[in-house]
Amino acid sequence: MSSSDSPVRDEPAAAATEDPDATGADLVIPGQERDSWLRRLTDSTALIFIALLALVTVFAVLAPGAFPSVPNIRNIFIAAASLLVISVGMTFVIISAGIDLSVGSVLVFSSVVAVKAMTAVGNEGWGVSLIGIGVALLAGLLWGLINGFLIAKAGIPPLIVTLGTLGAALGFAQIITGGINLRGVPPQLTQVLGYGRIFGIPWLVVVAAFVTAWGIIALRFTRFGRYTYAVGSNPEAARRAGINVDRHLLKIYAIVGLLSGLAGVMSLARFSNTNIAGHTTDNLQSIAAVVIGGTSLFGGIGTVFGTVVGVFIPTVLQNGFVILRVQPFWQEVAVGVVLIAAVYVDQLKRRARERL
Amino acid sequence: MSAPLLQARNIVKNYGHVQALRGADFDVGEGQVVGLVGDNGAGKSTLVKILSGIERPDGGEIVFDDRTVTLADAADAHRLGIETVYQDLALAPDLDPAANLFLGRERLKPGLLGRLGFLDRDGMADDAAEAFRNLGQTVQLITVPVASLSGGQRQSVAVARASAWASRIVFLDEPTAALGVVQAQKVLDLIRRVRDNGIGVVLISHNMPQVFDVADRIEVLRLGRRVARFTPSEIDMDDIVAAMTGVLDHEAEATS
Amino acid sequence: MSQLTLKRTSGMRPVVMAALLALLLTACGGGGGDAAESEAASGGASEAAGGSEAAGGGGDYDIVLIPGVIGDEFYVSMECGARAAADEAGASLDVQGADTFDPTAQTPVLEAVIASQPDAILIAPTDRTAMQAPIQQAVDAGITVALVDTTLEDPSVAVAAVASDNVEGGRMAGDALAELMNEEGAALVINVNPGISTTDQRQEGFEEAIAQYENIEYLGTEFSNNEPAQAAQIVDATLSANPGLNGIFGTNLFSAEGAATGVRNAGPEGEDISIVGFDAGPAQVDQLESGQVQALIAQKPEEIGTQGVEQAIAALNGEEPEAEITTGFEVITQDNLEEPEMQEALYKSQC
């Protein structure tokens, strides 16, 4: 029998008269049918989603003309778009029990080389814009491959590797630009991607939505997603099962690098400059978003949908607090509280699970 | 005794200065249970890892179906129909039993979706349920992570996985270590069923009564070499102990 | 077994509820909770999108100040001046801003402020091009906008632009530094980032002035990204390449602060370097007192804030605002620091 076949053999089933209590090998847990809706409701991702809904409701009630207005909702989505793109990639990384601190720097580096490339060919028109986009994506991909190679093949811990590339990518960006922001991108890029809409939805949001949809589908329904969970859950088990763990890690870090490059394009389209100093906390923000969404820092558990919620909670919090004229300091405190609460809830679930 | 299906000849394995195996031999044939016993540090787990493709030997050869083979990785062993339950179970705790059963061998949907990597989750779940059932475990498959199961249930999943996929040989390294009496008996029953299917079973265990209960043959490893081969019905515990402690050595270095 | 599971789950709900409660309390209570502010929130809601009143007087206007960055004494002083003018006119003033000086952070704050429909926004744009479109959004929503400190590529969208005459300030810095350098040696400028109108103009004015001195070599301008640490590194590097460096102009608070740190790190080599800084925050006054910095060009941020509010209210009242107002400077040295006029000019850390 080849290993690609099903393990099922034609055999009479064992006698069904065994007493479930005595056997002990019974894998039934009473009351837990497959995909029980009640169990899903108490899942930590569901809880944080309910928290987000509560937050939105509270703000809508406290500022009825302001918060739920179409322009404001649109602005919330636009503000979240770039961080969401990075965080989708970060979700895969953290589920694989890794981490990537270099995302903000890779974003900056990608936007710097993109502007350089576009300026060199005239800085005008769609062809040039596409070149810029391509260059940014390629730059992000390359940094991702560097990360992945050092982590998978050289066996250096992800925290250390990406701490190094965080510095290196930003450093190279500063060398290339002389430390000053590069300004000016083709108007097509800003007018369409940056400020344009399709069916009333900003293009930036459409891009983020596509990336999110890919992330949700890939993680839940494909072999690539399952391998991500397996590698994060028990890399040695994955290896012994025949999974090429090294190659998988390489792919994951390449993806998050690529997405950081994409976020660089989105930032250029919106702000028309490379904003070198403005992305130093992107890494922590996206890690926080992923963790708030229910993904475990220890790996093996998490969803992209949770990350979406995790991105929107701080964005909605800031937006609502500013509308309500709350002092800026409290906004940071609130995000900190949410983060700690989310991690604590995850911890409790883990401990409860392991005591069964 | 049937002709050996798998033979290890003169296997040498070093970890730095430590010689884990110094020319170890091993035989297992179709449709038989072989108990592999030895004191701690005898090299049993190392030998199993080598025969499972997880480690590569520094010397010696492996013969399978009368052909010399090289096992470069776990996949090579799987291709030959060799499966293993490791001491640490090698399960992914956050995945459910069905996902663990198909780990590394996931079924993809047919057609274009399959080429894009889409999993046939329902198909795998159904097949896993049937596999557990066929192997005598009254399991209704649930989508809880394996970490939520008890130690005994986890071990059952690992044993079921190996026996479900194995077509020629199954290695079981301490499969009853975490199990209570009743559960352990179920594993032994499973071992007999697998053997009756014509598959060779290698059982590593410290639990001598269980080994005596289920094994057709017993091979003793000591300090990285095979020192004795026994038929359980012809000997008793003392002989085993004697071999394990070095008093008895039937296979002294001089012989080939 | 299942009962155990349910028990554990319900034990977590109180934790989450508590956390949510904490959040809600923060949201409700953090705004000060007084009548004026809750009125601002609901008043903004009940008003039509136009937002401005044609009636005379200046009462009850809802004004929001968006500084370039939160926590910078220059902007805090501006807030004090703005608040004084608002109090006098009976208007309310809120401050909302980001904690980094960049358009990526300032834009979401501005957009949320727009949604809260104030009558007027006073804003210090963090980039002259990137902030053009977002500020246009405010104007399109019927909000009166006044620019304070920094300006835009096209400032005509605002009713008023109040700023120091930064070119003049740069000139004053150039002359002050030349005097400290005894009109000979090599001078360096540490700037922030190109694209910030104010600091670019200071550099311009400085270069104009320093060109007049034949015996002073102008080493050029380096950019510190508004990071004191980077400014310090620039000083180190320049000193290594040009040991004759004896004068540095830091174009803003952090640049001057960083320059002083760099000179201090240089030890004996840095002893003869004079530094002229822009802005007079507490840290810089300390540096002035201890002799690390020799002169400070202090702007008048309080006056900028006051003027900004006054012009915005004038526009809201239907009067004609003054479209462009420039404010002046004080040159503060160790010698005149104690004079009451100079003490007035120092920046505040709180109102």
Image (cartoon, rainbow, N blue to C red):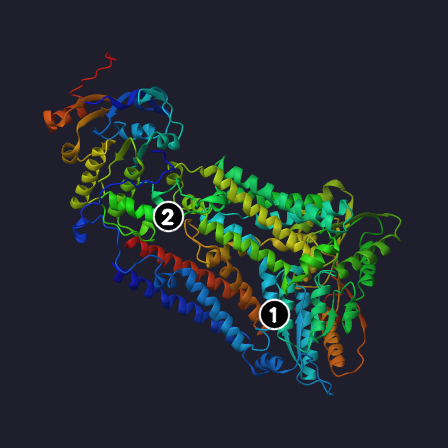
Residue at 47% of width from left, 63% of height from top? A338
User: Tag 1, which chain?
Assistant: A
Choose between B162 and A278: the one closer to the eye: B162
Q: Is residue C44 above or below residue A270?
A: below
Q: Residue furthest bottom?
A: C56
Q: Quadrant of residue C73?
A: bottom right
Which residue is denoted by mark 2 in the rendering?
B123
Q: Secondary structure at mark 2?
A: helix
- Total number of numbered labels? 2
Same chain shared by disc 2 and disc 1: no
Residue appearing at x 60%, y 80% in the figure: C45
> SS for tag 1?
helix
Q: Which mark is residue A72?
A: 1
User: Three-letter amino acid code at disc 1?
Assistant: Asn
Mark 2 to mark 1 CA distance (whole Å): 45 Å
- Residue shown at 58% from the left, 63% from the top: A77
Q: Position of residue A15 (x, y in %)?
A: 18, 47
